Amino acid sequence: MSGAVRVGVDRDRCCGAGNCVVTAPEVFDQDDEDGLVLLRRTEPPADAVDRVRLAVELCPAGAISVAPRPEPGHSSTPVPEASATP
Amino acid sequence: MDGAEHARLRRMLTAEFMIRNVRRIEPLIRQTVDRALDELHAAGPPADLVTHVALPVPSMVICHLLGVPYADHGFFQERSRTLIDRDAPPERVQRHVRELRDYLHRLVEAKVATGERADDLLSRLARDRVDTGELAVDELVGMAVLLLIAGHETTANMIGLSTLLLLRHPARYAALRDDPGHADGLVDELLRYLSIVRTGLPRLATEDVEVGGRLIRAGEGAIAVLSLANRDQAAFDRPNEFDPYRAAQQHVAFGFGVHQCIGQPLARAELRIALVELARRFPRLRPASTAGRLPTRDSSVVYGLDALPVTW
């Protein structure tokens, strides 16, 4: 029931409670400087998807979103903007 | 305090209490717990667990983190207690708030004034935020009051009540020693089941919102009662049972929303380490036979025990 997903976080909403880091440490981290959420990866491994969904529910600020991952191979052209962020 | 003003101040503290930094101070917590258990051992049996362990452990840890001298604990423990006591006369509450503020004001001023900065939270904020003009001294004093009170009252009461509950479930107490890896799950269930914050959180709807099938219109108030939410049958199976193996993470013992307790990683770590070490060092711990019922804090916003006589 938990298909492949893509995770998004909103650092403006984040209040640094850290529940996501406890729930799915391989996906979420906290910034050393401000304690706000950092994404370790946008596409969590299959065995972490349920915990990522739990992190969405546990987030007191509603700062985490999960969307179905687009089917790979649907379009075989590489996505250039994927590497645009530092 | 809400919105941008709250976010500005909260964000100066989020990094201080994040998981990674709490893990870094776990050895300090363990050392504090070990010393407290030595004290308990030396004082009995029987001895009072609240006096020797539950109260001093979180108090020493928050003092160390904030850079507040623990030697003054008699002064601020009495005052933080008054502040959350519903039966305290108003003039006493006002006097104690003022005295606590004045005490922390002097401490913060000293930290701002001194050239040499110690490595504690209030000193860091004085250096990184007050000196740069981002934070007023009064705001830092406000933070110090809040953190000192919150750091004391909640965890201390959780340690006392949790111990009593576990001693009434000897198999659970033994499991804590044999399976410390499960202690995190147990801590969440203790937080849910005991729900020691007994005051409702008042909120005002800023726009029409539906909660649990009921429409709350903009401008209307609502009070969130954490203990009721934590016993909600729709969220927890057989909610009135204490079950350390249930998935209890969705409890709201720390509140919910952007005001959720910022110190929760610290509170969790203190509770886990205190309980695991207690079970390890005192496997035969049991309540000491006392004539009457245990003294409970019935008029306090934060429920707990005033004493827990134990023997071993």
Image (cartoon, helix red, strand yellow):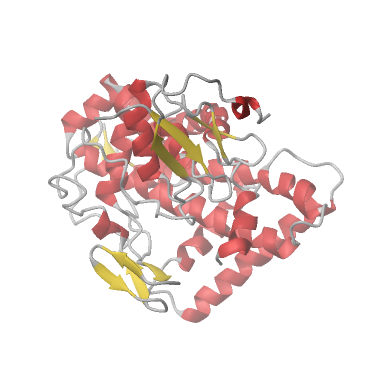
Residue A57 in the figure: left or right of residue B257: left
Q: Residue at x 46, y 27 (%)?
A: A25
Residue B116 sits in quarter: top right
Left/right of residue A68 with respect to residue B113 in the rendered view: left
Of the pair B311 and B65, the residue shown nearer to us: B65
Residue drawn at x 43%, y 25% as measured from the top left: A44
| For residue A66, above or below residue B211 | above
In the rendered image, the quadrant that contains the N terminus of chain B is: bottom right
Q: Quadrant of the C terminus of chain B?
A: top left
Q: Is residue B10 above or below residue B168?
A: below
> Residue B244 placed where, x, y %?
22, 35
Q: Is residue B274 left or right of residue A32?
A: left
View extreme (left): residue: B238
Query: Considering depth in this image, is B260 or B299 the residue closer to the camera?
Result: B260
Q: Position of residue B219 (x, y in %)?
A: 42, 79
Q: Is residue A27 visible?
A: yes
B257 lies above or below A47: below
Across and down, in percent, residue B186 comes to 28, 35
**The furthest residue to the right:** B115
Q: Residue at x 45, y 42 (%)?
A: A64
Expressed as whole percent of the image width and height from the top left, the position of residue B40 reads: 39, 35
Would residue B287 be seen by someone viewing this image from the given angle? no
